[in-house]
Amino acid sequence: MESNKKYWKGLEEYNNTPDFVKNNKNEFAEPLPIEDVLNEAGLSTVTPRRDFLKALGFGLGAVTLAACQSTPVHKSIPYLVKPEEVTPGIPNYYTSSFNGQSILVKTREGRPIKIEPNPNAGEFNCGTDARAQASVLDLYDVSKLKAPVLKNEETTWAKIDAFVKGELNKAQTSGKKIRIVSSTVNSPSTNAVIAGFITKYPAAKLVQYDAVSYTGIIQANQNSFGKAVLPKYNFDKADLIVSFGADFLGTWISGEEFTAQYTANRNYKSLENKKMSRHIQFESGMSLTGTNADTRVPVKLSEQGPALIALYNAITGQALAGGTLGNNATADKVIKLVAKELVQAKGKGLVVCGSNDVSTQILVNAINAAIGSYGTTIDLDNACHLYAGNDAEFAGLVGEMSRGEVGAILFLNSNPAYDYINNKTFTEALAKVPAKISFADRADETASLCDAIAINHNYLESWGDANAYEGYYSIVQPTINPVFNSRQAEESLLVWADAPVKDYYQFVRSNWETKVLPAAGLKWEDALDKGVISTAAKPAGAYSFSLSLAAVVTSISNSSKSLAKDIELQVYENVPMRDGKNANNAFLQELPDPVSKVTWDNYVALAPKFAEKLNVKEFDVVTVKGNNGYSVDLPVLIQPGQAQGTASIALGYGREKVGKAGNGVGKNAFPFVSFVNGTMQYATNVTITPTGGHYELAQTQTHHSFEGRNVIREATFKEYLKDAGAGTGKGEEGHKNYDLWDQYEKPGNNWVMAIDLNACTGCGSCIVACNVENNIPVVGRDEVRRRREMHWIRIDRYYSYETKDGDVTREKEIAKLEDLDHVSVVHQPMLCQHCDHAPCETVCPVLATVHSSDGLNHMAYNRCVGTRYCANNCPYKVRRFNWFNYWNDSRFDNYLNNEFTQLVLNPDVTTRSRGVMEKCSMCIQRIQGGKLQAKIEKRPLKDGDIKMACQEACSANAIIFGDSNDPNSEVSKALRSERIYYVLEEINVKPGIGYMTKIRNTDTTVQA
Amino acid sequence: MRDISMILKSVWKSLFLFSAISVLAVSAANAQDAKEGRTLFKAKCASCHALDAKLIGPALTGVSNRHPEAFLLKWIPNNAAMIAAGDPAAVKLFNENGKVAMTTFPELDEAKVKSILAYIKEGEPKPAAGTGAVAVKDESTSGLSIAGIVAIVLVAIVILVILGRASKLLERLILQKQGIEIEEDVPLKVGVRKMFKNKKFVMFFILCLIICLGSFGWMGMWETGVHTGYQPVQPIKFSHELHAGINQIDCQYCHSGAFKSKNASIPSLNVCMNCHKAVQARDKYDGEISPEIKKIYSALGYDPETQKYDESKTKPMEWVRVHNLPDFAYFNHSQHVVVAEDAIRKAKGLQPTEPVCFACHGPVNTMEEIYQYSPLTMKWCINCHKETDISGQKNNAFYAKVIEAHEKIKKGEKITPAMLGGLECGKCHY
């Protein structure tokens, strides 16, 4: 059955605006920038005949002279004393960990160049997110300080030590407080170091402060069950997931891990067993998780509390006050449906909520207890240690500082001058502290106010450890000598505390050998080799909820009432930028937001109808003024699916002192956060007034149009159960295909890919992984606006709705479609399809792109003359043109234009120069490397020997790569799935990448 | 110029070879014992002892005078036993030399020890000059003879011209004497001018010029960027002839990467020090350390007197790359020398004693200084990929599937890399 849905990527496509039509006529939005190119060379674009002849003569002469040049002298400098484990040309892999997640660091000749997930990590081996992939670039960031700084001047470590020790002793003897402000410390060794420091300076105390806080959940668990912990959520054990504003596939607690768990119940393997979980999302702004939900219901922020009360009432049959959703009939109806389903799924349901309000989280606990989630889908006994920040404690500290009670303050991995809710209060309070020391790697917003900056190592230069979950330990291992004259923060603390062991490596090692390793029965070297140690998990206990909810419900109702006025603003973390700590990472800045596809900026997201009501259009600049008086001017982005009467702004932007790439990108939204009832609240009221300005966001969404052709195939779970091939369009009467070309022989391997649209969540970590692996340049905001982004793999995000009345499901019936509130979304990774009958190959006049005997479409950069015919002829729009020498052009200064950052390049992949085409090579360097390894070892290639960069990074295992000539390979099995379809199959280019239909679990057995 | 220097070099080489051979011949005649002793000394002793200098162990010249032969015959094979047994002379010797334990050599019987002692007594054989003149054949003579022939032809032409002129003059004189008046010769200048007024001749001349310049340009363009014979000056006058040729050190010893990685890799200096801590070639420099070996020491901050390294004095060794491939071409050594070794040996007709490296790098064992032997052009790569028969890879399990498939296409015929996709762009350019 051919799908009768209409899919569109952006509103301009949906409305078919004149601009969209105009831009879509051409593959390249603008003609070749001859002027730019010539200006770069200092030439004029108007060329009189004589100048032309002069240039011609000079050119000819220059070429002749260049040709006469004798052999170029290249210096070759070997190691003086080669480390035993290094063989030039062969990568070494070291275990380490990033934010508590165990990883492998790939190094070449001593340079870390790529992050891979650690296969030893067992249950926590769940791919890597975009931040982890991009983190290698931070190591070589030239915006970092190159030496420690004392009173704004570069200095030596000896002087820093003398100064800090003096100040600490002064604070200690004068009876003032010493405070270490840090984001959550889950490293056992760092905690031990800090404990030692506190022994030396008893006035010291650690204050944990997270820019985006989870205090609400922790305190709710303390209140409900006497356990002040963040629980371990088991999405893989949940058949029914109901989320209230928790972006658990993206930014909530641990996105990659939850993605792996979540997709385990929804991917092709699970579907083959006729099993698929169901996911319902209530939220105001469209989040990554919302786009993946089977049913997504937009609710206002003020309706979230009442919706939870209504859900509790419907499940337990109680009648708590305030559970009415009078203005949102859809939500009201869906809540009743969901309540029935949750009761039915007892023990296999899970309700999560993104709110940081203690009362709201207590109510969520009560709901989860009522549906029997504790012990199955929620595990309180193997707690998560990723976030332990305490909002009230930090607010208290700011009070202490302003009262002059604090004698010395140390900032470790925290930047409150940027991300505290009221940075003016904070900076004023900070000025009253006599000694301010920061461990930041750069003079950031907080560090620049400090007396001393004891620059810390990057994690790739550090020793350390992490304890992300109870009983799960990972080691941080240095993979390079410090790039700059930095010193590890822990070592600084050891030195300042006059500890007997000042070498942090020795400290970590002895700490592990005494505390961690005996339980696991491992030696240090073995632990280092594995990278992780996982002790047996405790059995998850069932918890019952027995508190009275009266006070809780009153509190929720009150906050909800106070929120229900003006425009409700939600500030949220988006997937690329998160809390803004890595804002100087150009890979992350250019990673399109998974939903809006905006790069290099944040914006105010408004629903289409609501924007009309406010009389603003897309890209209009508006002033957003919060009820605390803070205001910013930001462009508007029209976001289908955004709840009416609400707006959303991403955090993490508006950094001022982070470096060339991140400075002045977007506006800071942290001051919109408010401190209510002891926790940070990320919802507030604002007014929005147009300024009359216009600002074009660099959005990639409609850059590569399929001209309305149907590239997405989807079916409901019910249809799938009836017919596994539902929605693929197979078995329909198609037109007859004729082949102009001969079939290619593929006698050896045939490299192909299968992509499971039901597993792909659209998070974008594959994009960054591909960038790092293949030396793909970052082009910057202006170039993205000109549609010149270089990403070899992109994730197309399609909105859709049903057009025929006959086929609407029950949820769709409830939904009123005209207001674009209830759109559904499909994410489709799109990369070179390596067509067997590739249209690009036919039109290349110089045979720069040709087919190989193993099913790949090769691209020989040195042959390409840049006619760009191939890109014009590519039906999938996956070819990219190098408009500039991005790695050596001062206009792209945020990235590779210095000797440090260039160290991140993968030496096995050519850096392309101006004027050539490029596209996904199917990581040919990995294919060739894997084949060679097998040849040397004289064995046949095994399935899984070769993995693509995108595939390895994927938490959801949505990308399966392999040899289709091997009938037992995973990809062969996947491609035999009945869900497989090929994009634009009808044009008969025989693509090498099969997609599996998107399945939505929208039909349920529960009767309304 | 390069040609001439190459010719000179080969002349030098032949002289050198010749003298080496004669040296060997002399010593062979004189002392069979000492010769065996020398070999044994180099193999067993030289890493710690030199004749004239203290290395790890003491200098050995005159050792037979310092110790009785009976003692040496016991000490050399098993000094540890003597020290353990408390032999006073042995303990004294041990203490005198910083209590550094000497390796035991149970494999050295009395005859062998005696021949070592004979060698030590006799010392390094001095090259005897001017005996046994045997012509050494060298392929460079062919180059010389061609030059010689050309010179002879040129001389002959000059003589012919002179003779011709002379006979003409004589003829004229005779005719003049006979009273026959002859016309004066047309002056050359006028003749040339007349010739250039002849349109046919001008046409012909221009045509010739175009053909000459064209073919010259054509040939020149093919040679552009091809640097066969490129031989840059290296920071250390390292002789592959000495190391790989005379001393027969395996290529892998220094270029260990070639068999594992895409890079053959230039050895780091600690590899040099494996030998050159002991080998200092003092005999050739009047007891001084060879200035070239000194360069290794100074780069590493190594003091040969104290035998200690000073890391603050290290400086990198900047070799000049001889074999330059373009950046966009991916070449992997291990692919060729490990996987394809047999096929390449067969295709290039290498002797079993020659390392597979010679296939592309040429006779490295005769290169005093390394130079680029192969053109390293893409045509050169492609030709080899088209011609090399790799059907011998049947015993490599990797090819089992691939060859199976191919046999369906071409039964029993030769298989080249080209047939396995070895000519596809993406195999080398990515």
Image: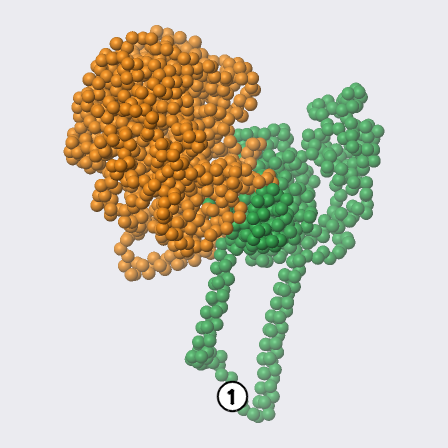
Classed neighbour count for the residue bearing mark 1: other residues with Cα under 10 Å, few (<14), some (14–19), many (≥20): few
Q: Position of residue A151 (x, y in %)?
A: 34, 22
Q: Which of the 4 quarters of the picture holds residue B304?
A: top right
Q: Quadrant of the N terminus of chain B?
A: bottom right
Q: Residue at x 76, y 47 (%)?
A: B24
Q: Nearer the viewer, residue B180 or B69?
A: B69
Q: Nearer the viewer, residue A876 or A405?
A: A876
Q: Nearer the viewer, residue A32 or A845?
A: A845
Q: Nearer the viewer, residue B365 or A375?
A: A375
Q: Amino acid at mark 1?
A: Glu
Q: Which residue is mark 1?
A: B183
Q: Which of the 4 quarters of the picture holds residue B380?
A: bottom right
* Image vertical order of residue A594 relative to residue A838, above or below: above
Q: Is residue A531 rendered to the left or right of residue A245?
A: right
Tell me, by letter, which chain the rendering colours orange. A
* Image vertical order of residue A69 relative to residue A946, above or below: below
Q: Which of the 4 quarters of the picture holds residue A496?
A: top left
Q: Position of residue B57 (x, y in %)?
A: 71, 30
Q: Position of residue A631 (x, y in %)?
A: 20, 26
Q: Residue at x 74, y 24 (%)?
A: B94
Q: Is residue B135 rendered to the left or right of residue B423?
A: right
Chain B as rendered: colour:
green
Q: Residue at x 70, y 51 (%)?
A: B17
* Image vertical order of residue A546 relative to residue B105, above or below: above
Q: Is residue B269 visible?
A: yes
| Structure colour scheme | by chain
Q: Is residue A787 visible?
A: no
Q: Position of residue A956 (x, y in %)?
A: 41, 31
Q: Give me the chain letter of mark 1.
A: B
